[in-house]
Image (tube, rainbow, N blue to C red):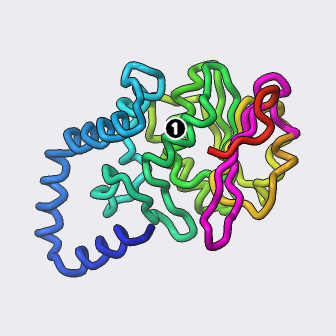
Amino acid sequence: ADEPDMATAKLVVRISDEQRDRLLARFDADREARRLALVRYITERLKIDERSSLGLGLLSLDRIHCFPRGRELLAYVDSPVRNHPGMTESALHAVVMTVQAVTPKPGDHVLICGAKGGYLAALVAWMVGEKGRVTCIDWQAEVAKYARNSLERFREIAGRWKVELREDVTVGLAGDIPWNVTIVNGALPKIPYELLRQLNDENGRLLFYLAGGGDGDVCYVIRKNEEIVREE
């Protein structure tokens, strides 16, 4: 997951400031084409209608807002990137598959446990619309600050989100319940029953990962009044 970062670190060491500036200038000139190429790759790979809410969100929300200066070249690569100590921004296809699994709808109230770089929250905030709300909670102050700064750059979703610091994100945020959607943005050692209790009884959806040891993490989606537990 960290290979792109390692390659970038070596590249930065080996080029001069002048060469770096020329490289970034070339990147800026091709930026929109690169962004649209990544969006097209994702929509085709995951069979997303570009006229759908998710498709329009991908076209409208520039992922580069979640990347710090010096790592802009990685914004349009479909790969996980370590953008901050203790935080890895997920690959774009993983973010989109998460959104597809819980299908945020206009007016939904969504809780994201684990803010990461903020792009998942931005995409969900786009989909829930002006009447919806997205709340991110994180246990690391620096990561919460990073996500907040990223989200502030997306003018398209202003007023639809907030980021809060919480010591234990696995117990959710009881003050704003019930949630229509809760996403655990990272692997857990056990089923988060408290998050399940905070879901809307009619249509609540919970997505979480259970740590699978050497076999990898397993993603589960719980939909109240439908499937009890479904692995996806």
Percent x, y of residue 33: 19, 40
> Which stretch is magenta?
197-223
Percent x, y of residue 158: 53, 30
* Residue 63 falls left or right of residue 27: right
Residue 43 higher or lower than 4, as above or below = above
Residue 100 higher or lower than 27, as above or below = above
Q: Residue at x 66, y 29 (%)?
A: 133
Residue on which the image places disc 1: 122
Q: Secondary structure at mark 1?
A: helix
* Residue 169 falls left or right of residue 185: right
* Residue 216 falls left or right of residue 2: right
| Amino acid type of the residue that numbered disc 1 sits on in the rendered structure | Ala
Percent x, y of residue 94: 49, 48
152 is within the stretch colored magenta: no
Which of the 4 quarters of the picture holds residue 203? top right
Q: Residue at x 77, y 28 (%)?
A: 226
Picture quarter with the N terminus: bottom left
Q: Residue at x 61, y 68 (%)?
A: 215
204 is within the stretch colored magenta: yes
Q: Residue at x 12, y 69 (%)?
A: 18
Picture quarter with the C terminus: top right
Give the camera-side residue of 186 and 20: 186
Which of the 4 quarters of the picture holds residue 50? top left
Instruction: Classify 10 Å Cα crowding around label 1: few (below 14), some (14-19), many (20 and above).
Output: many
Give the camera-side residue of 73 and 218: 218
Give the camera-side residue of 64 and 48: 48
